[in-house]
Amino acid sequence: MGRMFLGTHAPRLDDKGRLVLPAKFREALAPGLVLTKGQDRSIVVWPATEFTAYAARLGEASRSDEKVRAYLRVLFSSAFDEQPDKQGRVTLPPVLREYAGLDRDVVVVGNGQTVEIWDAAAWTSYLTSNEDAYSSINEEVIPGLL
C-alpha cells in the first residue's frame, strides 16, 4: 500500500490551469499520476501505481453489466496521465476543470489512497451538508470497527 494522503489544502490555479501540488503530496505523486472525474463533481488524483491497481480490479467486473460498461467508459475516457514538473505543478485538462467547475480558488483534499480537487465553494457546501451526518454514519460505513 502506498502513501496515505491526508488533510485539506487551498492552492490556487494559475492562468494556464496549473495547480501546485501540496508539498506533503509531491513525493508520492512525482513518479506520475492519473487525473479522473470523481464523484460529486470533483477531480480525483491517483498515484499512477494506485490507478493501475484499481484498473486491474475493475477489469474483473462483468462487462455484460450495462452499469459497469458505462462506469468504465466515463472513467477511462476522461482519464489523463500527467507528470508534475520540477515545481510540483500539474496541468488540469480543460475538460476536467469544466466538469469540476474549477476557476481559481480550489481545495485539495487528501482521501486516503487518492487526492481530490474541488472548487472551493463546492467543497464548503459539500462539507456543510455532510459534517452533521458524519458522526452518525460511521457505524453504517464501518460496522464493528468504531
Image (tube, grey):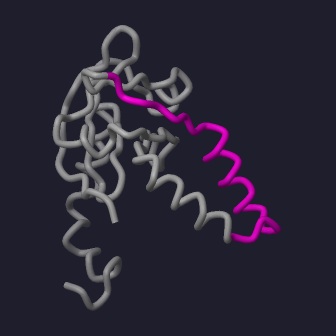
Q: Quick check: is 84 in the magenta stretch?
A: yes
Q: Is 75 positioned to the left or the right of 132 in the image?
A: right
Q: Residue at x 52, y 32 (%)?
A: 99
Give the image location of residue 127, x and y in percent: 25, 49
Q: Is 29 positioned to the left or the right of 33 in the image?
A: left
Q: Residue at x 66, y 54 (%)?
A: 71
Whether residue 12 is situated above or below residue 118 in the rendered picture: above
Whether residue 144 is situated above or below residue 25 in the rendered picture: below
In the picture, the quarter occupied by the C terminus is bottom left
Give the image location of residue 62, x and y in percent: 75, 71
In the picture, the quarter occupied by the N terminus is bottom left
Give the image location of residue 79, x and y in percent: 57, 39
Q: Is 62 positioned to the left or the right of 31 in the image?
A: right
Give the image location of residue 126, x and y in percent: 31, 47
| Image quadrant where residue 119 sits | top left
| Image quadrant where residue 116 sits | top left
Q: Residue at x 45, y 33 (%)?
A: 100
Q: Give the range drawn in magenta.
A: 61-85
